[in-house]
Amino acid sequence: MINARSETAADKPAFRHAFRRKRCLIAASGFYEWQKTGSKQKQPYYIHRRDDKPFAFAGLWEAWSKGEEPVESCTILTTEANDLMRPLHDRMPVILDVKDFDCWLDPAVQEPKKLEPLLAPYSGDDLTAYPISTCVNSPRNQRPQCIEPLAAG
């Protein structure tokens, strides 16, 4: 599960343990969201900081065994969309403020009530979003065009 709702992660059996003991930061330079534009059409958008500096999502990680093979996985917590994201989608990743990193990563903080304030929608004043090519829809496409703005036209 690549995403988990921050509002319920502390209580869901799949995430409860990780929420209390295995929190992480997931570094990112940006992320994608798809806006519905028709009955079956979706326009991808690239969302990133205006200054192109990296940021961090609130994440959870887990290690478990599948047979004899160890499996390590992580999930990104999501929250309600902020004003920038709302026209695109009703959810967005939890972006943590640098000042909250220590609290989020502190293994001594295990009470969900102490962590919930960190999971609010990011203000987004320093974020920007623009439409990009649908080439991003295929995971085989790992090239600069996946984040270049669409030409006005």
Image (cartoon, helix red, strand yellow):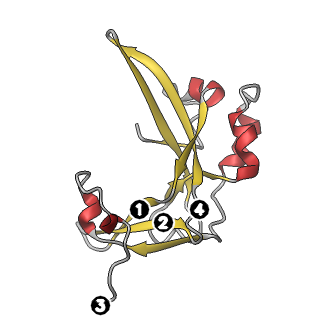
Return the disc, 1 or 4, that comes first in the chain's sequence.
1
Q: Secondary structure at mark 2?
A: strand
Tell me the mark number nearer the camera, choosing from 2 and 1. 2
Decide if residue 50 is on the left or right side of residue 153: right
Q: Residue at x 77, y 37 (%)?
A: 114
Q: Residue at x 64, y 25 (%)?
A: 21
103 or 7, which lies in front? 103
Residue position marked by numbered label 3 in the rendering: 153
Return the disc, 2 or 1, that comes first in the chain's sequence.
1
Q: Residue at x 75, y 38 (%)?
A: 103
Give above or below for 16 relative to 94: above
Give above or below for 55 relative to 46: above
Q: How many marks?
A: 4
Q: Mark 2 and mark 1 in contact? Answer it, CB < 8 Å.
A: yes
Q: Amino acid at mark 3?
A: Gly
Q: Mark 1 and mark 4 in contact? Answer it, CB < 8 Å.
A: no
Query: The N terminus lies in which quarter of the figure?
Result: top left
Residue position marked by numbered label 4 in the rendering: 53
Q: Residue furthest bottom?
A: 153
Tell me the mark number nearer the camera, choosing from 3 and 4. 4
> Mark 3 and mark 4: span between their CA atoms?
29 Å
Return the disc, 2 or 4, that comes first in the chain's sequence.
2
Return the disc, 1 or 3, that comes first in the chain's sequence.
1
Residue position marked by numbered label 1 in the rendering: 33
Q: Amino acid at mark 1?
A: Glu
Q: Secondary structure at mark 1?
A: strand
Tell me the mark number nearer the camera, choosing from 1 and 3. 3
Return the disc, 3 or 4, that comes first in the chain's sequence.
4
Q: Residue at x 27, y 73 (%)?
A: 38
Residue position marked by numbered label 2 in the rendering: 47
Q: Position of residue 30 (x, y in %)?
A: 49, 59
